[in-house]
Image (tube, helix red, strand yellow):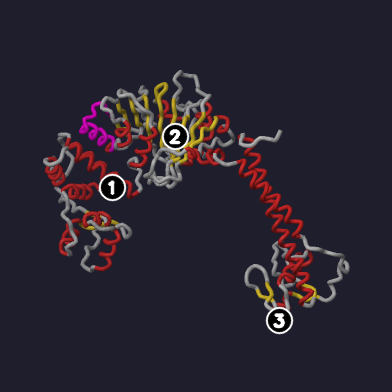
Amino acid sequence: MTDNAAPPVAPLVTGAEIARLAGVTRAAVSNWRRRYDDFPAPAGGGANSPLYALAEVQEWLDRQRKGQEVSPEVELWQAMRAVYGEQMVEGLAQVAAVLAGETGPGLPDDVVTRVQGLAQTESPVDLVNGLTDRFMDSARRTGSDQVTPERVVRAVCHFAPELASDATVFDPACGIGVLLLSLASEAGMRCRGQEMDADSARFAQLRADLLGRSGVRIVSGDSLRADQWPDLKADLVVCDPPAGVTEWGREELLLDARWDLGTPSKAEGELAWLQHAYAHTAPGGHVLMVMPASVAYRKAGRRIRAELVRRGIVRQVIALPPGTATSHALPVHLWCLQRPVSPGVADTGHTVRMVDLTDNSPDGDLEPRSDQVADVPLIELLDDTVDLTPGNHLRSRHRDFPGEYADLRKELEDQVRRLAALLPGLVPGGGPGSLDGATTSVADLARAGLVAYDGPEPVSASEQLDTDYLQGFLRSSANARRSTSASGSYRLDGRGSRIPRMGIDEQRRYGSAFRALTAFEEGMRKVDELSRQLAEVARDGLATGALAPEE
């Protein structure tokens, strides 16, 4: 315990926390702020995230008969938040230390009093677990990467291999130990962890001690630059590494023996963590890595991905549902690796299982359907990109190539038959230049009010002028030259263009022919697109074995 000269800081709460205190929605709190002039003024925070004094909020709720009795746990949490703010992990570690019976400088006296009061009615395990849950909920709502989200923990536990009761589990970036302690649930398991943030490492160890987990040892330090477990070989290594970190120590670690699969580039810090995890895996042991989706296809990581595939190390890649990890904008992947049982002997005969759960709810079933799984041979992965994105491999494997080929072929045949019928019947005319005599400029037609510009193409604004006749002559090569600027741009509405003078009946006869030519051109474009699609389906179907040539 310490004597604190400074007066205790008044606890502050957010609008969301006020909503939980009052048992209402956040929208209701926003409405109170607008409707009630006596609603407490912000005591901190910013314009977009104001903070309010807890005592003032409680007094206002009581006056308005909107308040609920604030539990001692909430009061403790708010008192801790007032002291530690964004450094809440430090406060959690200090509380855990008090619950574990440690003495020395730490928590302010008022927080210590609250902890001791709660300890008389709750077990230390329940109290520390409750604070951990509150911290995880706060991290989830803010999108913080300080702690592995509960949904990610659930997914890793679901896809983790079955472990012996005396197995060794290692997490080199364990944070507050949520993922590590969730996986290694058996009391006899040896758990080893390392975490760069000293407060997080301390809290993880103290929490494990309070839970009675004697086989847990967690140390602080930078795993990549200062590995505290150099001789450790684990049955399972799990890791949710920091994403997007470029300053991970590449320059000072260029000759490190861990880069057996290739030296990661500065932008590929996640692949440095992957190789660190793999280096700590025993023969036959497994690695489960939480990875941003981009690591599966980024050009800089191609060589390392190729080695993972070529040596038979990567066994499964799972694309988790969007929203599984709140700190990643894109869906995250779970990479499952296994070290060969015999050192130096790679298992190259297997396939890589691709699982795509991106259409699922993040809180839904994690067991994939048959159409969400594909076992991909290594040779198909070892191309120019070595793309390990599951969805890219499932799309081609679950396509109905025979059905697509038959449908596209029939549609193409029907379209080609229709083309001949679209061509207008044309007979010899008066010869080239026979229509050049009596012509009218489009500019004159516009001034006379016969042409309107409602959209990209001019149209007739009078019964004296046929639109198809007008646009057909405008598209002729002679008028195209008049409508093309010195820079090469073309304007269909070129007012300098000229069209022949004809009666309305003759205009409609020409307009009908031009309209048929336009339909023919559209049909040709459709044929061209169908031909491209048909060739692609046929080629991919032959290459994958879904289609075969006729005997």
**Amino acid on which disc 1 is placed:** Glu
Where residue 333 appears, as percent x and y from the top left, is: 44, 39
State left or right for residue 545 relative to residue 13: right
On the image, numbered disc 2 is attached to which residue?
335
* Residue 211 appears in the picture as rendered: yes
Counting residues from the start of the chain, the first of labels 2 and 3 encountered is 2
Q: Is residue 84 above or below residue 348?
A: below
Q: Closer to the camera: disc 3 or disc 1?
A: 3
Residue lying at 29% horizontally and 44% vertically, measured from the top left: 136
Where residue 203 appears, as percent x and y from the top left, is: 25, 36
Question: What are the residue bounds of the magenta stretch?
Answer: 200-218
Regarding mark 3 in the picture, which secondary structure is present there?
loop
Q: Which mark is residue 305?
A: none
On the image, numbered disc 1 is attached to which residue?
86
70 or 350, nearer to the observer? 350
Mark 3 touching mark 1, by CB under 8 A? no
Counting residues from the start of the chain, the first of labels 3 and 1 encountered is 1
Q: Is residue 85 above or below residue 487?
A: above
State left or right for residue 436 relative to residue 132: right
Q: Which mark is residue 448?
A: 3
Counting residues from the start of the chain, the first of labels 2 and 1 encountered is 1
**Amino acid on which disc 3 is placed:** Ala
Residue lying at 48% horizontally and 26% vertically, measured from the top left: 260
The quadrant holding residue 493 is bottom right
